[in-house]
Amino acid sequence: MEEVITSFDKILLLTEEETDVVPIGEADEDDVHERLKTALVGKVLTTKSFNREAFKQTMMKIWNTSMEVRAKDLGENLFLFIFATELDRKRVLRNGPWNFDKALVPLEEPNGNIAPSRMMLKFAEF
């Protein structure tokens, strides 16, 4: 038994390089919070399959923003939308709720503390 423990100890030892701590600076944190000011997370509430590219293009068209919106598919019908301006983001939130192919698309502002997959995107105000 001691041999097994010794061999595991050798395998599990970290090299000096692997033990280095890489600090995340305040500048990085500030940058993330700045980006979140222009972001929304949305979810298509449907059990049906749908064309994700058509969804992204349709939402961008009906939102009619003043500048480009980037959309990233996060999987599980979840999307991250990055707006060029905070004003466009606020207008999209204010003019909701939104739908796509008869499915509700609730939107929420990310706060940086909760992963998008854990956000409660099940309701929208009418």
Image: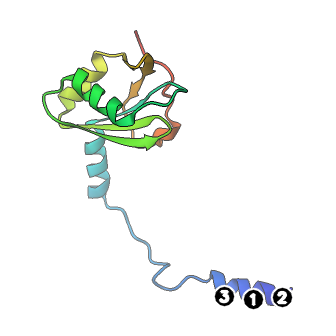
Name the outermost residue toward the top: 126
Give the Cα separation between the discs numbered 3 and 1.
Answer: 6 Å
Give the Cα separation between the discs numbered 2 and 3.
Answer: 12 Å
Identify the residue position indicated by label 3 in the image. Answer: 10
Q: Amino acid at mark 2?
A: Glu
Tell me, yes or no, if residue 100 can be seen here.
Answer: yes
Where is 80 relative to 124, above or below?
below
Residue at horizontal 56 percent and vertical 82 percent from the top: 14
Give the Cα separation between the discs numbered 2 and 1.
Answer: 6 Å
Residue 8 location, x and y as percent? 72, 83
Give whichever of 71, 40 is nearer the camera: 71
- Tag 2–tag 1 contact (CB < 8 Å): yes
Secondary structure at numbered mark 1:
helix
Identify the residue position indicated by label 1 in the image. Answer: 6
- Colour scheme used in the picture? rainbow
Where is 95 relative to 30, above or below?
above
Which numbered disc flags the more N-terminal residue, 2 or 3?
2
Residue 27 location, x and y as percent? 26, 57
Residue at horizontal 43 percent and vertical 43 percent from the top: 74
Residue 54 location, x and y as percent? 33, 31
Q: Picture quarter containing residue 89? A: top left
Secondary structure at numbered mark 2:
helix
* In the image: residue 123, left or right of residue 23: right
Residue 2's disc number: 2
Residue at horizontal 38 percent and vertical 35 percent from the top: 52
Give whichever of 55, 126 is nearer the camera: 55
- Tag 3–tag 1 contact (CB < 8 Å): yes
